[in-house]
Image: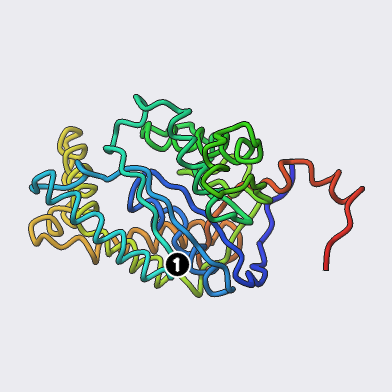
Amino acid sequence: MSVPRIHRMEPGDGRVVLVVTAHADDLALFLGGTVAAWVDAGWRVVAVRATDDRWDSLGLSEEETVAANASEFRLAGEILGVAELVELGYPTDTLADVSEVALREKIIREIRRFRPYAVVTFDPRSLYGEDNQDHVAVARATDEACWASQFDKHHPEHIAEGLAVHGVFERWYFAREVERATHIVDIGAQLGRKVAAAVAHRTMMLNVLNQLRLQAQTGGWRIDAVDAALGAGEPGPLVAELVGSLSAEVGRRHGLEAAEEFRVVRFGGLEGILEALGTRLP
C-alpha cells in the first residue's frame, strides 16, 4: 500500500476542476481548503450540486429552505473563489430512488461541457459509515460518468448539441474517512476561507446542530455549546470551531497545521502505461 504524500499544487493555467457534490455544504466541509488552494494556483473550479436541499433547515418552509440554501451555496462559492455553480435540482434525500443512468447522464453532460482536467467527488470505495444515500448515489454516478463521457455512443444527443467526448485525466475522491488516501493537501493558508465558507451555510448548520442536540438528548446528554448556538439562532462561532479543529486534526496526522485527504487516480489507474509508452507534450 502506497504512503500518502503531501500534494504540491501545480499551476492550473486556467485548467478546469469539476467538483460534483450532493448538497450545498459538501463543498466547504469536505474540501473547502483544497478548492481555495486550486483557485489560488490558477485553476478554474466549477461546482455541481445534485440536490436542492429543500428539507435541510430548521423551522423554515420548504420554499424558504430552497431559497436560503441556494443563496448560501452561492455565498460559499464566492468565498472559495468558485468560477461557476451548476444546479441539477433533484429533491434532496431522494437520489437513492433516482435512476443512476439518468443522474449519470447529467454529470456526463457537465464533463463534456466543461472538459475538466480533474473530476472530484465522493469516494465510492470509502462508504463505510456513510449513512447519506445522496452521497452514495453521487459517488457511483460520477465515477461511472468519468469513463462513459469518453464514448460517442453514450448520449449521442450531446454530440448533436455541439458537445464532444472528453477524457478526465485525474479523479479526486473525498469521504468522511478516506480509505487509502494518496494525496494530502496542506490547507493552512486557506483554512480561514474554508471556515468562512462553512459558516456561510447558516441554514444547514442550524439543522446539523439540532440533529446533534436530538441525538445527545436521546442518549441522556446535554451539549451546552450546541444549546447556546441554537438558542441564539447563530451557529457560526461553533461551526467555525468544529471545522477548524477537524481540519487541524487531519493536519496533525501529516505534520501540518491543517489538511484535507483524498484518494487520487490518474489516467484511469493506468499511469504506469502512460509513463512507459507516453511522451509529455510541451
Q: Residue at (48%, 36%) from the top-left corner? A: 105
Q: Is residue 57 above or below residue 193?
A: above
Q: Is residue 132 left or right of residue 206?
A: right
Kind of residue indicated by mark 1: Ala
Closer to us: 195 or 107: 107
Q: Is residue 86 left or right of residue 163?
A: left
| Residue farthest along the front direction in this orientation | 160
Camera-side residue of 79 and 193: 79
Against 274, is 156 above or below?
above
Q: Residues within 10 Å of mark 1 (few under 14, many from 20)?
A: some
Q: Please give left or right for residue 70 compared with residue 210 in the image.
A: right
Q: Residue at x 36, y 34 (%)?
A: 132
- In the displayed structure image, the side of residue 146 where residue 221 appears, left or right: left
Residue linked to disc 1: 83
Element type at mark 1: loop
Q: In the rendered image, which quarter contains the C terminus? A: bottom right
